[in-house]
Image (tube, rainbow, N blue to C red):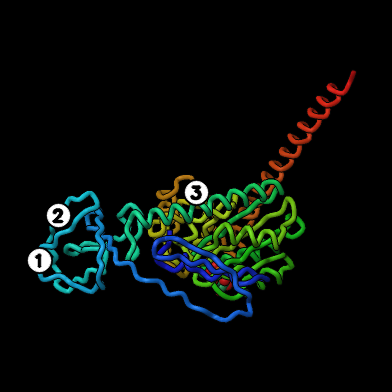
Amino acid sequence: MCMTCGCGTSDVHVEGGGHAHTHTHPDGSTHSHVHDPSQGAHDHVHEAVHEHSHTHADGTVHNHAHAHPHDHSHAPAAGEMHTHADGTTHAHALHDPAHAHHDPAHSHGAEALHYGRGPAGNSAPGMTQSRLVQIERDILSKNDGIAQRNRATLAQRGIFALNLVSSPGSGKTTLLVRTIERLAGRLQVAVIEGDQQTSVDAERIRATGAPALQINTGKGCHLDAAMVETALQRLAPAEDSVLMVENVGNLVCPAAFDLGEARKVVVLSVTEGEDKPLKYPDMFHAASLLLLNKVDLLPYLSFDVERCIEYARRINPSIEILQVSATSGAGLDAWLAWIEAGAHAARRQRLDQVAALQQRVAELEAQVARLQSP
Ligand SMILES: Nc1nc2c(ncn2[C@@H]2O[C@H](COP(=O)(O)OP(=O)(O)OP(=O)(O)O)[C@@H](O)[C@H]2O)c(=O)[nH]1
Ligand SMILES: [Mg+2]
């Protein structure tokens, strides 16, 4: 998950509301407050933390703290002593005389720099691995609790909810527009749109006649469950309908955030290259369905469809894959059938819940009648 890209300090705006701010402090604590839209801008400055985590090329990690501005570098091939949390120390030689200590990864030879091999799978200047793990756990467990609430609300109303994720421009909104048009008269569709700025996608959806609500995430690069909970209250999608959530265009961060959806659908367009499932495995692992979009462009590209499918299944053996073109309409029948099957199952589940509750009420009424009879 992302703690290096500004998600933690996002400036979120749900259409029709004020500006809610969440600030993450260097010690990992957060606070939120809401501004009236008429209020001016303001800044929050946090003190830098002089604590360093080093990930070595072999994946081992150690931390140390400094009480002084951190701008020193190492002499050529000088042995540098590091003390680990458990008190053990070791020295290693640094090969690059210009190697500044604020770079958390030490490269040896021509090896790739890998910042994701520590326990956090991530790196942020000034943060230890254990602190990163702690922050991620705190954020995600809070998010997951709200997502479960969303999931229960959606299930009670028989709503089939999809979370559409992809890189920017893969065709999510175009697909949604075509899907809504093709489902007209068969299924009601409501849309929650996620973008950093602008309401253009929500406007494109509303032009079809479907209800849509825009969430602007500001610096944030993904939707989270709390944003969707607020949007659901405003949008109030109809019983037994379909809810489509178009996430912020980003193949990384939205993978970690459960919104309470029934399924994540990853859209990959053929112009992006067949290697994307291997490069962004979390997203393809989290998704139930891969929509391979813009197949109308295949004659003009060297995109290898079979190889892409093989890569996607290597990451996620059970992922379903449909080849579509939002503009030509190719493959859309299979996509619509997939949605209708999901919507039917959500409706069936709601009716089963209602039947079970009715049966329970009848049993309790019979029990009361027995107790009241002389
Ligand atoms: N040739 C072709 N172009 C497509 C297809 N689907 C979408 N496009 C084009 O791709 C561009 C981006 O489409 P959008 O629907 O805005 O993509 P998006 O994923 O919603 O983009 P963001 O919301 O910015 O992440 C537009 O110019 C579309 O016309 C397709 O199936 N074939
Ligand atoms: Mg879009």
Q: Upstream in the sequence, badge 1 or badge 3?
A: 1
Q: Nearer the viewer, mark 1 or mark 3?
A: 1
Q: CA distance from mark 3 to mark 2?
A: 45 Å
Q: Amino acid at mark 3?
A: Ile
Given residues 40 and 290, the one toward you in this image is 40
In the picture, measured across the screen, residue 164 lies left or right of residue 59, that is: right
Residue found 39% across the figure and 62% down from its top? 27
Q: What is the quadrant of the C terminus in the image?
A: top right
Q: Can you tell which mark lies on residue 319?
A: 3
Write down which quadrant ligand 1 falls in: bottom right
Given residues 170 and 165, the one toward you in this image is 165
Residue found 62% across the figure and 68% down from its top? 14
Given residues 19 and 344, the one toward you in this image is 19
Which residue is under mark 2? 90
Return the x and y of residue 251 as percentages of the image width and height.
46, 62
Which residue is under mark 1? 78
Q: CA distance from mark 1 to mark 2?
A: 13 Å
In the picture, measured across the screen, residue 279 lies left or right of residue 338, that is: left
Tell me if mark 2 has few (under 14), some (14-19) or many (20+) residues whose alpha carbon lies within 10 angstroms of its own: few
Q: Amino acid at mark 1?
A: Ala
Return the x and y of residue 105 as percentages of the image width and height.
25, 63
Tell me if mark 3 has few (under 14), some (14-19) or many (20+) residues whose alpha carbon lies within 10 angstroms of its own: some
